[in-house]
Image (spheres, grey):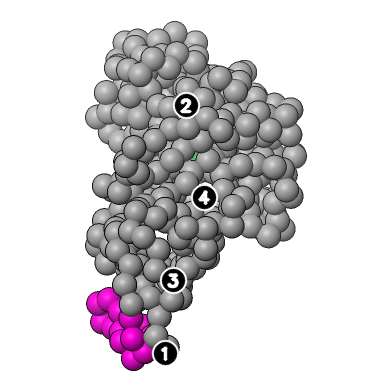
Amino acid sequence: MTPARAEIVVDLGAIRHNVRTLRELTGVDSMTVVKADAYGHGMVEVARAAREAGSAWIGVATLDEALALRAAGDTGRLLAWLTVPGEDYAAAIDADIDLTAYSTDELAEIAATGRHARLQLKVDTGLNRGGASSADWPALVAAARAGEQAGHWTVTGIWSHLAASDEPDHRANDAQEAAYREALVVAEDAGLRPEVRHLANSAAGILRPSSRFDLVRFGLASYGLDPAPGHTPDLGLVPAMTARATLALAKPLHAGDSVSYGHTWTADTDTTVGLVPVGYGEGVPRHASNVAQVQVGGKRRAVRGRVCMDQFVVDLGGDLPTPGEDVVLFGPGTHGEPTAQDWAEAAGTISYEIVTRIGGRMTRRYVDA
Ligand SMILES: *Cc1c(COP(=O)(O)O)cnc(C)c1O
């Protein structure tokens, strides 16, 4: 079989292993977060693997994502948390999705469906992004309790999100956890008895046991990537994604010749170069120009010159491999290939962005290693 020009290979066995490992670490239920097409890994397939590995909950941002999971046959507990006015809450309630409300306006929209919802409330404890501010929290809680007594919904959860969980010593972590505990007391005093309280994402779930409560929302770590480089202990998580391409061409280059747009790299000795048929159209970061590495036929090779829309060039150091050779951009790192974390460091970003953006014209293939 001819290898694909460029593809993403996702190891669902790694996903299952990671989900199980994280669940065992925390001792509480996990919510596997599969928003943004499961961080580029494929939402439906990852959600299925996560369920098989015992993930009690799946989390997504949008209602469209949640509805797509239901359409694909997912029947377990499923939370969505990012809506705008006018969303089709009725469809989401009919599909048995747990909704999240940040405001009393959202409560009014949900009540107007005339359906009985499962509803979670989000309190903003200092990220200052979504959620009810501490000033608005008592009113949101009171309205949620009144709506529960009126039969509009059951409040199934109360949650928040941390700003600096990847920096375990950041003072925001203590402050936010304390604010979250206070918000829980306010809710309890108002008569709410949520089934799940959750605060932690991957980094907090691993590094901050006090933040685990009833449930940890694991995104990045489920994919085997490190949510807090430099802080995370070795848990044996396995990166699930390999991004590979097929070498299109190899040819000699003379000393003094410059490569790719803008001629930003010039060979100082005679060498050979190879053409890799992916570029920023596939989500390969242009910021990786001249700094990232790939693995060609088992050897590390440097990206030379600018990453273009459809292609980039690597230095083959005098070797002339046959076109068709395997080029691994990143993978688990177990065979000497770079990792998504290596690419993130080279391109000045985080591994979240590397895996989530890679794709474009690449095909996706699932394996179970
Ligand atoms: C994306 C997201 C997560 C998962 O975060 P990771 O750092 O990938 O574990 C958890 N909670 C919320 C609200 C999110 O938006």
- The amino acid marked with disc number 4 is Gly
Q: CA distance from mark 2 to mark 1?
A: 49 Å
Residue 165 x %, y %: 63, 51
Q: In the image, which is nearer the foreground, mark 3 or mark 2?
A: 3
The type of residue carrying mark 3 is Asp
Disc 2 target residue: 47
C-alpha gap between disc 3 and disc 2: 42 Å
Answer with left or right where residue 181 lies relative to residue 153.
right
Above or below, comparing residue 58 to residue 299 in the picture: above
- Could one spot residue 213 in this view of the protein? no
Residue shown at 73%/34% (left/top)?
25
Residue of label 1? 268
Q: Between residues 257 and 114, which one lies in front from this camera angle?
A: 257
Vertical side of 58 occupied by 307: above or below? below
Callout 2 touching callout 1 (CB < 8 Å) = no
In this rendering, the label closer to the viewer, 2 or 1: 1
Of marks 4 and 3, the one in the foreground = 3
Q: Which mark is residue 331?
A: 4
N-terminal-most mark, 2 or 4: 2
- Residue type (three-letter) at the residue carrying disc 1: Asp
Residue assigned mark 3: 319
